[in-house]
Amino acid sequence: MNEINLPVEWQESLELPHTGTYFVAVRYPNGFGTYDLADWDGEKWNLGYEGEVVGWVTMTNFMGVIKAGWPKGDESPE
């Protein structure tokens, strides 16, 4: 599989457009970080583990930069 860099425009404010699930960048207390999906409840991030969301993008924006296709085993027979 080839590696491709995708241009995600990270948002960093806490003025999110709506509650829901976002693609986020999370910084752990030890300084390392990861990407994840996290729910914003209108006031705070619900991660389920210790970490700080340092950037986010809407799922619409995230899905707009990838072409994931769909698993062949779930496609309807033609």
Image (cartoon, helix red, strand yellow):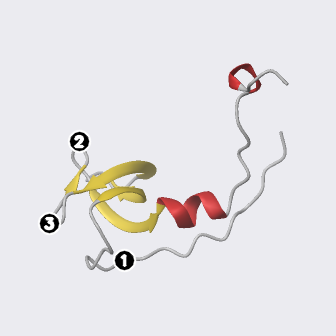
Task: Give the mark nearest the N terminus, 1 or 2.
Answer: 1
Q: Which mark is residue 12?
A: 1
Amino acid marked by disc 1: Glu
At label 2, the amino acid type is: Tyr
Q: CA distance from mark 2 to mark 3?
A: 17 Å
Q: Nearer the viewer, mark 1 or mark 3?
A: 3
Question: If you read the primary sequence from the N terminus, does the residue marked by circle 1 or circle 3 appear first?
Answer: 1
Mark 2 or 3, nearer chain start: 3
The part of the image, by quadrant, that contains residue 68 is top right
Say which of 67 and 2 sits in front.
67
Name which residue lies at 77% across and 56% down.
Answer: 4
Q: Looking at the picture, does residue 53 appear above or below residue 15?
A: above
Q: Is residue 63 above or below residue 74?
A: below
Mark 1 is surrounded, within 10 Å at the Cα level, by few (under 14), some (14 to 19) or many (20 or more) other residues, namely some
The alpha-carbon separation of the residues under discs 1 and 3 comes to 15 Å
Measuring 45% from the left and 65% from the top, which residue is drawn there? Answer: 58
Relative image position of residue 43 (x, y in whole percent):
14, 66
Location of mark 2 (residue): 49
